[in-house]
Image: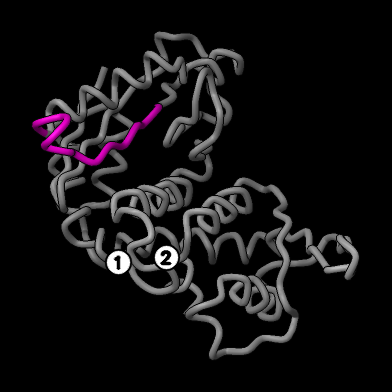
Amino acid sequence: MISRLIQSASIDMKMDMETLLNGGEITVCFDEQIVFSQLENDENAVWSLMVASGYLKVCEVEYRGMMGKPWYHLAVTNMETLSMFTGMFTGWFADKSTNYSSFVKAFISGNVKEMNIYMNDVALSTISNFDSGMHPSSVSEPERFYHGLVLGLLSELYDTYEAKSNRESGYGRYDVMVIPKIDKQKDAMILEFKVCDIDTEGTLEDTAEAALQQIKERQYDAELIARGIDRKHIRHYGFAFQGKKVLIKEE
């Protein structure tokens, strides 16, 4: 149940899960009394369920506002729970497509041709699963999908890479950044996702090029350079979506 609820949850919740998987804390407000009938409609009830189930621990409680509303600082309980989460998020893709691990390998090695083959298979099999449940169609399917993809990448590459999304760098917010944890000689990757609008951008190829141009113009490399990663070890990928079709270009 928890896996399905997170998979179809809002982007904000997926980003909170990224923070938790990266060893951080999140601060959320929820009712400690779980009402199971609310789980499909109230995202905060999912946090309550995960705390009650022992998956997340309360590190601190602060009371805000005139009514003293409780806000909970949450973290992953232990390594066993972390392992459970990583298996869950990888399973979103592995259960539907045998090519997800192949995509990850092609992604790390920089084989764009194979990335395109495998990602189209993964998207065809799974993309609609990220646009259902609590907030259907409030954002585009690709946007939900790529935030799910980040959690999958984070889980698959947990020992060697950090993956995060929608954070500020340079003059804007990049979509996805994958950063080596230890070896700065390994490549870091910046991914920008765009939905193809045939009225303004024409083809998938044009859209992928526009994604790459955005990475360059908004200087998303800034965070990586500040971390001591040389420009020659930074890869840029533009992902263009049209329905369940994906085109990936590298620069």
Q: Secondary structure at mark 1?
A: helix
> Which residue is found at the position 31% from the left and 53% from the top?
140
78 and 140: which one is in front? 140
- What is the magenta range? 190-203
Q: Quarter holding the C terminus?
A: top left
Categorize mark 1 by other alpha carbons within 10 Å: few (<14), some (14-19), many (20+).
some
Q: Does the magenta-highlighted stretch encompass residue 196?
A: yes
Reading the image, the residue beneath label 2 is: 7
Please name the residue shown 70% across and 54% down the image: 26
Are the residues tagged 1 and 2 within 8 Å (C-beta)? yes
Q: Secondary structure at mark 2?
A: helix
Q: Is residue 202 above or below residue 104?
A: above
Where in the figure is residue 127, as x and y percent of width and height?
25, 58
Image check: 206 left or right of 49? left
Q: In the rendering, which numbered label is found on residue 39?
A: none
Q: Is 52 on the left or on the right of 135, as rendered? A: right
Identified by mark 1, the residue type is Asn
The residue beneath circle 1 is 129
* Amino acid beneath label 2: Gln
Q: Residue at x 33, y 22 (%)?
A: 236
Comparing 200 with 248, the one in front is 200
